[in-house]
Amino acid sequence: QVQLVQSGAEVRKPGASVKVSCKASGYTFSSYGFSWVRQAPGQGLEWMGWISPYNGNTNYAQKLQGRVTMTTDTSTSTVYMELRSLRSDDTAVYYCARDLVVRGPSAYWGQGTLVTVSS
Amino acid sequence: EIVMTQSPATLSVSPGERATLSCRASQSVSSSLAWYLQKPGQAPRLLIYAASTRATGIPGRFSGSGFGTEFTLTISSLQSEDFAVYYCQQYNNWPPLTFGGGTKVEIK
């Protein structure tokens, strides 16, 4: 069965960086893309970007361009999301989510990683 | 960017009753519309994709309809486990993928 397991909670100071991992199992890793979605406390879902493990192609939300980088490691079936120059409003739960079909809706989700940005 | 607008923000329904949730797109998304359910402290779960196709394991009381800019999620008879927040998402024209603001279905 498809499983996505994310890394644990992180605390960072403003201006720092964070890198969240998402390890996939139960299917052929390179066959489906991943989105990263975040959710600030009490707020809705915000799409951050998408990556294809097949060829490394990425699409990022315009508001995060220049601060976010998504990568994959096919040897370990892991997707990474790095966010730099953290601000307090980056405090959120960060989810990885796998496409149902390539560039389709997100059928499988990780458990979420809480990133807290505080001085 | 396609803006997704959900209504109402909150829906109060008694168990066993029918719930109807709406989602509107700022421009046509064809049938590339998904619905998700999110319970407190949990990740979202895919309910419906392609506007009307139930995802694997989703019970038949959930149904989706619509095309273009107007979409509806109907829960025919609310069960206790259905009280949650529901989000729509368009995946027709992206980036960016966009979500609606959510509808909270609460117990009346």
Image (cartoon, coloured by chain):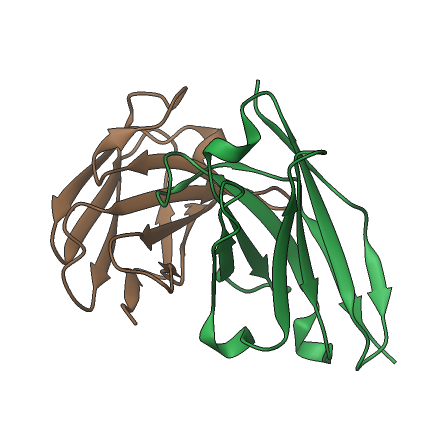
Q: Give the chain ID for the brown colour.
A: B
Q: Is residue A15 left or right of residue A110?
A: right
Q: Report if residue B22 is visible in the image.
A: yes
Chain letter tied to green = A
Identified at 23% across, 38% down, the residue is B50
Q: Is residue A15 left or right of residue B30?
A: right
Quadrant of the snapshot with the C terminus of chain A? bottom right
Which of B17/B56 is in front? B56
Q: Where residue A11 sits in the image (x, y, percent)?
A: 85, 64
From the top left corner, tell me how far across and down residue A5 is, in percent: 70, 36
> Is residue B83 shown to the viewer in this render?
no
Answer left or right for B87 relative to B54: right
* Percent position of residue B91, x then y: 30, 52
Left/right placement of residue B95 relative to residue A111 reads left
User: In the image, what residue occupies the spot 26% across and 47% down?
Assistant: B33
- Say which of B47 and A2 sits in front: A2
